[in-house]
Amino acid sequence: HALERGLNRAAVTTGRQAFLERVVAPLMEAVGQQWSTGSGRIVYGHFAAGMVHAKLVGMLAQPSDSGPEKPGLLIAAPAGQCCYLGAVAVAIVAQDHGWRPLFIGSDLPAEEIAAAHAIIAPQMIALSITCRVNDDFMLAELRRLLDLIDDRCPFIIGGRAARVYRACAGGHRGVFGETLHDLVDALY
């Protein structure tokens, strides 16, 4: 109950982006550190992620003027990436900056993201890569996705592990970032 109250209080007393940067990111980083060092149980991380997920989805569902005339932003976490809270945060920030975000999920193969791109025809694609799991696999997935999407559709690859994959962008129109400020810059 204390976590829920704290999240609700912080969401009311700060702006949405500040809430993401000053509350959600440090909370999830601390929980992740505790899990990785063994000083905290895995269940604590899952519990906190569930509470944060519910709060972020609620924020994203708040009425906004995000009609079809707004530019579309396709958001996904590629194959091998099971963490998705950063991707939902991207959707919230994009919504606040006049975009129509569509988060399609996590752990998605390149072909599925490309299929969503073909169906939705977004103005930009955002990929969330937070964990380094298998660099060769991730690079192969990114290259396959870049080969499958239209070169005219720019993309941003963000998250804690994004910089590792910067070189694979080659001649594609892509931006790499690690912060929500990098995302905001890419949206304009």
Image (cartoon, helix red, strand yellow):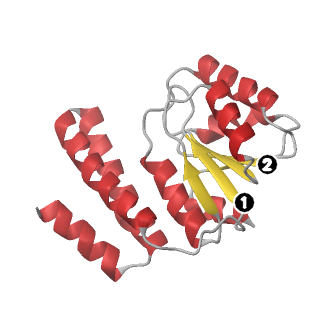
Three-letter code for the amino acid on which mark 1 is drawn: Ala
Residue farthest along the left direction in this orientation: 1
Q: Is residue 146 left or right of residue 98?
A: right
For the residues labelled 1 and 2, say whether their Cβ atoms are less than 8 Å apart: yes
- Where is residue 185 shown, x and y percent of the image? 70, 65
Left or right of 40 on screen, residue 81: right
Q: Residue at x 57, y 32 (%)?
A: 78
- Quick one: 151 or 27, which is closer to the camera? 151
Indicate whether 137 appears above or below 38: above
Which residue in the protein does label 2 denote? 154
Q: Residue at x 88, y 37 (%)?
A: 171
Residue 51 in the image: above or below residue 141 = below
Quadrant showing the N terminus = bottom left
Q: Can you say whether 108 is above or below 30 in the image?
A: above
- What residue did someone put label 1 on? 186
On the image, the x and y values in percent for residue 44 come to 18, 42
For disc 2, the neighbor class at 10 Å (few under 14, some 14 to 19, many from 20) is some
Q: Please say whether residue 72 is visible from this viewpoint.
A: yes
| Residue at (68, 20) in percent of width and height | 140
Instruction: Please state, as top left, top right, bottom left or bottom right, where the C terminus lies in the image.
Output: bottom right
- In depth, the one of 179 and 63 nearer the eye is 63
Q: Report whether 178 appears left or right of 71.
A: left
User: Who is closer to the viewer here, 28 or 89?
Assistant: 89
Under circle 1, the secondary element is helix
Where is residue 162? Give x, y as percent: 61, 40
